[in-house]
Image (cartoon, helix red, strand yellow):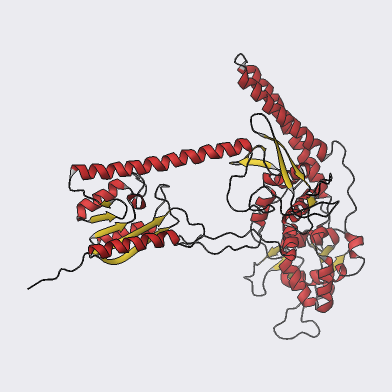
Amino acid sequence: MTISQKPKRVVIYARISDDREGRQNGVKRQEEQCRKTAARNGEEVVRVFVDDDRSAYSGKLRPEYARMIEYLEAGHAVGVLALAPTRLYRKLYEPKTRQDYLHFHDLVQRLGLHVQTVKAGRFDLSTADGRKSARDAASQAQYESELIGERVEDAKRDNVRDGTFRGGGRPFGFEADGITPRSLLCPVCGATEGFRIITVTHDEGAVEAVMVECPEGCTAHPVNAPGSEAWHLESATQAIADGKSVRSVLRTWQTAGVRTPARRKRLPDGTRTEPISNDWTPTTLLKLLRRPRNAGLMEVTGEITGKGAWPEIVDRQIWDICQAVLKNPARRTSPGPARKFLGGGLYLCGVCREAATTTGRGRARNGSSYTCGNGQHVSRNAAAVDQFAERVVIARLCESDAHDLFTAPAPETPAGPSTAELTARHAALTARLKGLAAAFADDDDSDPVEFKAAARRIKEKIADVDRQLAEAVAAVTSASSPLDDVDLPELARRHAEDPDEALKWWREQYSLETRQRVLAALVTVTIHPAEQGRTAGWRPGSKYFRPESVDIDWTPRTTA
């Protein structure tokens, strides 16, 4: 009588380091080959563990590998199949994740597992020679990974020296090659394709200049094609340099339908989605505006290292001014505790002329209230006063003469150097500092003390230019009107259709801070004591609010 043996229960482990397309073709082929090996051995595959787009050398945890170890320790299988030893591990020892040869070897010895790979055959860890072969294979795998890492670092250093594109996703404003702007237009012949990028380099290989040549041989410098990504980015940078806010630029982009370059999103299981573009946010737009690449500069770990091998899509001086605006400490970047009402510190008490404060915070029976500094003269429902004041202001802003009447005149040119002159001086001082450092490095007889003193003087001059540039930018920014960020035609259109919807849109579209600045620039709101009792026409559930007790004077709110 023949007694049939139950087939051995084994698991398959498949892994691939890079699967940016998210198609899992590599791991599927590994699984197919392992299943063929299991069939030849008469083994039963009870489970497949796959780490797609996961490196075994990076030191990051491989979640499916960890689940496989737990599965084996629980006794659910007695063997492991993989394409090659490098799929299981690429390091002799990895203390952080314990996903290495030594820990795997310990597991095999402890549980008596049998391990087989398609490429290298069975692991025989019962003999010294077998264990040595396994260790040598693991050591060789780590060596190859380290060698690849060194080559990658060398290539990165070459890219930095040559100013070339270092790869990755398509940069906004450029084609996938990272060099060609998206998109160009010849102002003479109207050509939109076939432009030639010409890079001029120094003897040592560093980029000196980048030029763009029209396919028709026109001598005019190409410009960013209207409506293109490069054009939108150039316009946004100019708007910030002119004193516009990042959120106003963001609204313009949202209206125009400008979106981020499509990217594949990595999912928790290691797979990637199809390319998806997203809406810009204040954070991502701010990061884009600060990107040195826009001005044709190479950046490495936050430091500008020189010119890149791509043309600038934003004028360097305009980009420098934009950076000064964004770095200006006078810009408020943290809104602080959230506020719900407009009038705190803005409205006035009609008796003592003290600024109104908000009390109640919504917990009082009738909601939050505005009271004067003394707390004795007025106490009015905050939401009702805000709604009345904003309705009056919105109605006035929707009249045809509002823009010319309320927007600030063009600011006077401030005394002293212009921002362009300061930017040029900053660039000259920076170049002088780099030249000084190069001269010191090449001269073995240089005095370190003299070098440090000279460098300190230049740095002090650079700091002074930074201060002047910040002051010049702040002067331009402060001269702008809060209505510069308000879409008055859209507000007027909505108000003509439905004043209630216009008020709702106004509050959703503009932050509380922006609406406060508009009110402070246009009116002075004074709250007077109101008569006691219900108003005429009062209905149950409505508030006791008398509009005649709130005075709106069309002169800006001033502080003592």
Give the quarter of the figure containing the N terminus.
Answer: bottom left
At 55% across and 60% down in the image, what residue appears? Answer: 264
At 69% across and 27% down in the image, what residue appears? Answer: 433
At 9% across and 72% down in the image, what residue appears? Answer: 2
Q: Along the horizontal axis of the image, is 507 left or right of 451? A: right
User: How far across and how far down the image is residue 18, in percent?
Assistant: 47, 54
Question: In this orientation, which residue lies closer to the viewer: 372 or 74?
Answer: 74
Q: Residue furthest left?
A: 1
Question: In this orientation, which residue lies closer to the viewer: 384 or 199?
Answer: 199
Question: In this orientation, which residue lies closer to the viewer: 363 or 454?
Answer: 454
Q: Residue furthest top?
A: 445
Residue 327 visible, this angle: yes
Which quadrant of the view contains residue 414? top right
User: How far across and how far down the image is residue 471, in percent?
Assistant: 78, 41
Which quadrant of the view contains residue 506? bottom right
User: How far across and how far down the image is residue 59, in percent?
Assistant: 41, 47
Question: In this orientation, which residue lies closer to the viewer: 346 or 25?
Answer: 25
Relative to 121, residue 3 above or below: below
